[in-house]
Image (cartoon, rainbow, N blue to C red):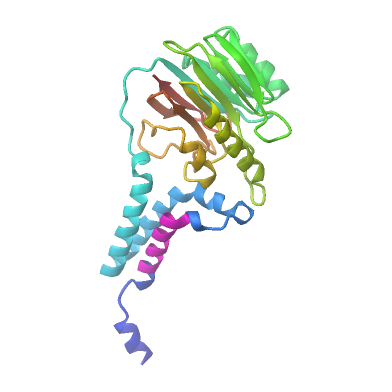
Amino acid sequence: MSSSRSRRRPRGVLTGIAALAVGALLLWHGLLPDAGGAASLVETFLPWAGVALVLLGLAALVRLSLFAGLAVAAAMAVWWASFGTALLPAMAAGTPRFTVVSENIHADNPRAAAVAKDLAQRSPDLIALQELDAASRDAVEGVLDGAYPHHLVVGTVGLWSRYDLHDGQGLSLGLGWQRALSVDVDTPGAPTRVYAVHLASVRPGEYEQRDTMLGELAKTVAADDAAHVLVVGDFNAAGSDRALAPLLSRLGEAPDGALGLGFTWPAAFPVARLDHALVRGLTTAESEVLPANGSDHRGIAVGLR
């Protein structure tokens, strides 16, 4: 009897159910309870659900299961709706008025000067750095100050510029110390209000400080009446993370210019995009993730107009 029931069971049922479960996660991940920051971690790696769907698709093919194949196709359509635009290379959108690079150079990095030199060799107009400490700050200043005579460092975050800076200030964003800054930059054509940020890290059970900083940053940007705004740095949050949604509702980010999802961390084998350049009143003409250069993050470069 058990053998007969097994023969009557449609092929690939478990594969199809697994695919539908992945599709449901993609559609309704916002309903996951964020106990201990677990939902944030799941959402950070949500794009990798596509790999699971490819494997399930192969299983459906091997099983020659129509049910499993349709389930995988439906789930893949949901994945594509969520991440397909980011996956495809973005078209160039005109000539940028100015260019920006940003990188977390990694605390206690003996190669901080080499990282700064690598970024400067790309000749950007602005360089935003995170995780500066006393030693790396001196090393970076020795490399950048000649070509970038205007700079502001607050805590472990710094901005080097070819253009004049005005009204710079440190931001605590709800913490007891400052790890972000805002400053007006005399960019060509019109000034730009730049926020350079390094938000708190997220680990199992440790996410409240990051969420607090993101919430305060969203409120700060909402209250900012500057015509041109750039928020750049290490957000320790992926675009699919619910904690970043309030900020993304007010600012935009262009897809990377190369095929792929533009992951930036960890540098050796990136699995998530934690570094962003978000804009309001500006258009991202070009965007790319830079090759590994001695930090644990990969840098990002954008051209803005």
Classify residue 167 by image quadrant: top right
Q: Residue at x 50, y 21 (%)?
A: 226
**What are the residue bounds of the magenta stretch?**
16-29
- Asked if the magenta segment contains residue 1, the reply would be no
Q: Position of residue 234 (x, y in %)?
A: 56, 33
Q: Position of residue 121 (x, y in %)?
A: 49, 15
Classify residue 108 by image quadrant: top right
All told, the count of numbered labels is 0
**Residue 274 appears left or right of 62:** right
Name above or below for residue 71 compared with residue 179. Answer: below
Q: Residue at x 34, y 48 (%)?
A: 81
Name above or below for residue 138 compared with residue 212. Answer: above
Quadrant location, the C terminus: top left
Task: Kindly tell me whether residue 163 is visible in this rendering.
Answer: yes
**Residue 104 appears left or right of 78:** right
Q: Position of residue 255 (x, y in %)?
A: 38, 34
- Asked if the magenta segment contains residue 26, the reply would be yes
In depth, the one of 174 and 203 nearer the eye is 174
**Residue 186 appears left or right of 38:** left
In depth, the one of 56 and 189 nearer the eye is 189
Q: Residue at x 40, y 27 (%)?
A: 287
Quadrant location, the N terminus: bottom left
Task: Kindly tell me whether residue 140 is visible in this rendering.
Answer: no
Q: Residue at x 33, y 34 (%)?
A: 89
Name above or below for residue 67 compared with residue 257. Answer: below
Q: Main secondary structure of the magenta part?
A: helix
In depth, the one of 90 and 123 nearer the eye is 90
